[in-house]
């Protein structure tokens, strides 16, 4: 057995009793980008390794999410990009279960690379919650029944972002956490999942920000950690109370990753910040200066930090010491964040080519390069032993 297979076998053995987590939000469980699934795919193409392929009605840069046997995805279309689509597929077969549409109520201005389906939806056992960049927010049952709908620009008319929004909502128990940093009225809100009404809403600085919130548990409090150009802040998810604030980070595009009480934030490369009960404790404990993310978020996996910038430069460092292990270039431009599982790290570029790197190695080792073709800007999802990739025209399930 070679080193890669032996290391993966040991890792799989250690995780054998851990149930596979749902990939229910942007970058999966708490936006880590990491799956505990085993037997994940290594090689595929247009004619091989595909479990199924499903056509999409329009483009989108949001990511697919999976809960149970259902996969949800959003798209936008129309001359003004004002038709907002939410679709549900059987995650095992690719059968389209339902397709719902809304008419946008907010501005459809955006950078040409983006669109109104840029925020990734979030799902639970009851269905899916879809936030569009027009400020339209909808909750659907698993059968596609509209549970509730809100026009956030109807409620807060100054919401605006001329280059497009992309921060994604998350779920904390019975609350939908909606990040709405923008050039107009900015806020972080907790919305009741049953009725769509605000449980709490706190004002935020007027900043354009694409970061998705994270969570951690502090005693009996579930804390929401939100990074932005104005700095890092922690909020009580029950009340919206700001528990602490820090200027150590000033994020705007990539989302940090958290491991226990250590936040790996995209600042100065990627820095490790220890979080106490009242926020960051002192200066960063580690700086991986060569791990330079662009728009894609950094990844922490198997003791290593990974990042890829827009030009395809992949960097990897030891997560404890910050020591650079390698910096190499992959072909193409990158918008999707890397994801990982089963000893593999997946880097998907903007033209459908996905490089699979060996996460067990301290050197740059490409296990496979797979090409689907088509525009691919959304981050892949991993669930049920499969990799799900969306292009501008289709949705692919890859795996056994």
Image (cartoon, rainbow, N blue to C red):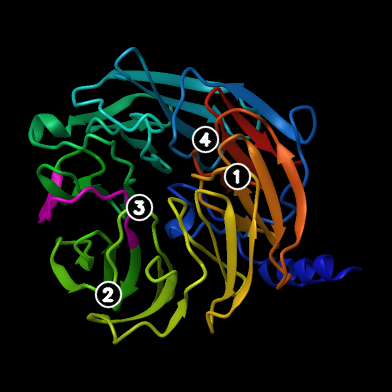
- Label annotation for residue 248: 2
The answer to which of marks 3 and 2 sits earlier in the sequence is 2
User: Callout 1: helix, strand or loop?
Assistant: strand
Q: Residue at x 46, y 24 (%)?
A: 59
User: Callout 4: helix, strand or loop?
Assistant: strand
Q: Measured from the top left, where is residue 284 in percent x and y?
A: 37, 82
Q: Measured from the top left, where is residue 301 in percent x and y?
A: 58, 67
On screen, 352 above or below 242?
above
Q: Quadrant of residue 52?
A: top right
Q: Residues within 10 Å of mark 1 (few under 14, many from 20)?
A: many
Q: Residues within 10 Å of mark 4 (few under 14, many from 20)?
A: many
Q: Does residue 92 appear to the left or right of 101 in the view shown?
A: right
In front: mark 2 or mark 4? 2
Q: Alpha-carbon distance for marks 4 and 1? A: 20 Å
Q: Measured from the top left, where is residue 140 in percent x and y?
A: 34, 30
Q: Alpha-carbon distance for marks 3 and 1? A: 18 Å
The answer to which of marks 4 and 1 sits earlier in the sequence is 4
- To which residue does mark 3 refer? 253
Q: Does residue 361 appear to the left or right of 213 in the view shown?
A: right
In front: mark 4 or mark 1? 1
Q: Measured from the top left, where is residue 195 in percent x and y?
A: 20, 37
- Residue 120 seen in render: yes
The answer to which of marks 2 and 4 sits earlier in the sequence is 4
Q: Alpha-carbon distance for marks 1 and 2? A: 30 Å
Q: Are marks 3 and 4 in contact (CB under 8 Å)?
A: no
User: Between residues 49 and 363, which one lies in front from this camera angle?
Assistant: 363
Q: Residue at x 47, y 57 (%)?
A: 29
Q: Which residues are magenta?
A: 198-214
The answer to which of marks 3 and 4 sits earlier in the sequence is 4
User: Callout 3: helix, strand or loop?
Assistant: loop
- Label annotation for residue 348: 1
On screen, 322 above or below 192?
below
């Amino acid at each position: 057995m070679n080193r890669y297979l032996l290391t993966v076998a040991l890792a799989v053995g250690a995780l054998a009793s851990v149930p596979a987590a749902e990939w229910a939000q942007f970058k999966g469980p708490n936006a880590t980008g990491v799956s505990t699934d085993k037997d994940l795919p290594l090689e595929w193409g247009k004619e091989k390794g595909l479990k199924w392929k499903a056509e999409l009605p329009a483009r989108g840069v949001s990511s697919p999410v999976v809960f149970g046997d259902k996969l949800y995805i959003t798209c936008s279309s129309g001359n003004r990009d004002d038709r907002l689509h939410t679709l549900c597929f059987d995650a095992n077969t690719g059968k389209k279960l339902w397709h719902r549409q809304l008419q946008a109520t907010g501005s459809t201005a955006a950078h040409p690379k983006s669109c109104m389906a840029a925020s990734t939806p979030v799902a639970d056992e009851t269905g899916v919650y879809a936030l569009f960049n027009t400020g339209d927010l909808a909750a659907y049952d698993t059968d596609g029944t509209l549970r509730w709908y809100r026009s956030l620009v109807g409620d807060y008319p100054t919401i605006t972002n001329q280059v497009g929004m992309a921060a994604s909502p998350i779920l904390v128990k019975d609350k939908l956490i909606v990040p709405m940093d923008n050039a107009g009225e900015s806020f972080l809100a907790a919305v009741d999942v049953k009725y769509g009404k605000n449980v709490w809403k706190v004002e935020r600085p007027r900043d354009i920000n694409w970061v998705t919130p994270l969570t951690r548990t502090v005693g009996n409090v579930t804390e929401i950690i939100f990074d932005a150009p104005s700095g890092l802040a922690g909020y009580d998810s029950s009340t919206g109370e700001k528990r602490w604030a820090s200027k150590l980070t000033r994020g705007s595009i990539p989302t940090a990753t958290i491991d226990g009480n250590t936040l790996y934030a995209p600042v100065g490369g990627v820095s490790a910040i220890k979080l106490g009960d009242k926020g960051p404790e002192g200066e960063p404990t580690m700086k991986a200066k060569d791990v330079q993310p662009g728009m894609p978020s950094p990844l922490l996996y198997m003791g290593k930090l990974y990042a890829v910038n827009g030009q395809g430069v992949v960097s990897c460092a030891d997560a404890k010491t910050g020591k650079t292990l390698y910096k190499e270039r992959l072909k193409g431009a990158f918008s999707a964040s890397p994801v990982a599982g089963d000893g593999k790290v997946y880097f998907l570029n903007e033209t459908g080519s996905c490089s699979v790197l060996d996460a067990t190695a301290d050197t740059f080792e490409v296990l496979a390069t797979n090409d689907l073709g088509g525009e691919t800007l959304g981050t892949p999802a991993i669930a049920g032993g499969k990799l799900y990739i969306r292009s501008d025209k289709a949705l692919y399930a890859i795996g056994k």
